[in-house]
Amino acid sequence: MSTKTDELNDLIEVTRDGKRFYEHARDEVKEPQLKALFTDMAQAKTDVITALQGKVAANADTPATGGTLTGKLREVYADTRAKLSSDEGATYIAQLEEAEDRILHAFEDAMDAQEPDLRADVAPLLPKVRACHDRMRDLKKAQ
């Protein structure tokens, strides 16, 4: 497996963490608007994952199928905080915004890599990743 494939698979895993977290949060919150938002955000993550998987497969390698331990721990932490909070929606929004930070930083790191092929694969996805990040950042600030 090439370094490029390793990097793409890392991006798949961190993005999958975000997708799973949004799906989990959607199932936990009661507010319909948040459920709809979290569904949209999970779909955006699915789109990014699908594109990355295609890039890995094009290299004749196997795309990652899991997430990360950090992602799972963040989800458990958010659940605990939400149960202790009077506003579970705000708790999930704050934690999901941090997850978006993690995803954006991973993509920006890939863009800073010295491998032009990796940057070429990641660049078209960066606007969607940034848009998701900005959406959650703005929602957190509005709280």
Image: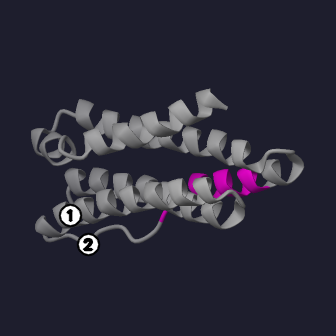
Return the x and y of residue 94 as percentages of the image width and height.
65, 39
Q: Work out whether residue 87 or residue 31 is closer to the camera in this orientation and state it.
A: 31
Q: Label 2 vs label 1: CA separation? A: 6 Å
Disc 2 element: loop
Q: Which amino acid, mark 2?
A: Thr
Picture quadrant of residue 83 = bottom right
Mark 2 in CB contact with mark 1 (< 8 angstroms): yes
Q: Which residue appears at 29% of the width and 68% of the height?
A: 63
State left or right for residue 100 relative to residue 56.
right
> Taking 115 as reference, is 141 above or below it?
above
Residue 86 visible here: yes
Return the x and y of residue 70 as percentages of the image width and height.
59, 52
Residue 70 lies in the magenta stretch:
yes
Q: Work out whether residue 139 or residue 114 is closer to the camera in this orientation and state it.
A: 139
State left or right for residue 121 relative to residue 28.
left
Q: Which amino acid, mark 1?
A: Val
Range covered by the magenta-colored residues: 67-79
Return the x and y of residue 15 as percentages of the image width and height.
42, 54
The residue indicated by pointer 1 is 56
Picture quadrant of residue 95 = top right
Question: In which quadrant is the C terminus drawn?
Answer: top right
Q: Residue furthest top?
A: 141
In the picture, the disc for residue 62 is: 2
Picture quadrant of residue 54 = bottom left
Our reading of the magenta stretch's main secondary structure is helix
State left or right for residue 78 relative to residue 129.
right
Q: Which residue appears at 28% of the width and 54% of the height?
A: 8
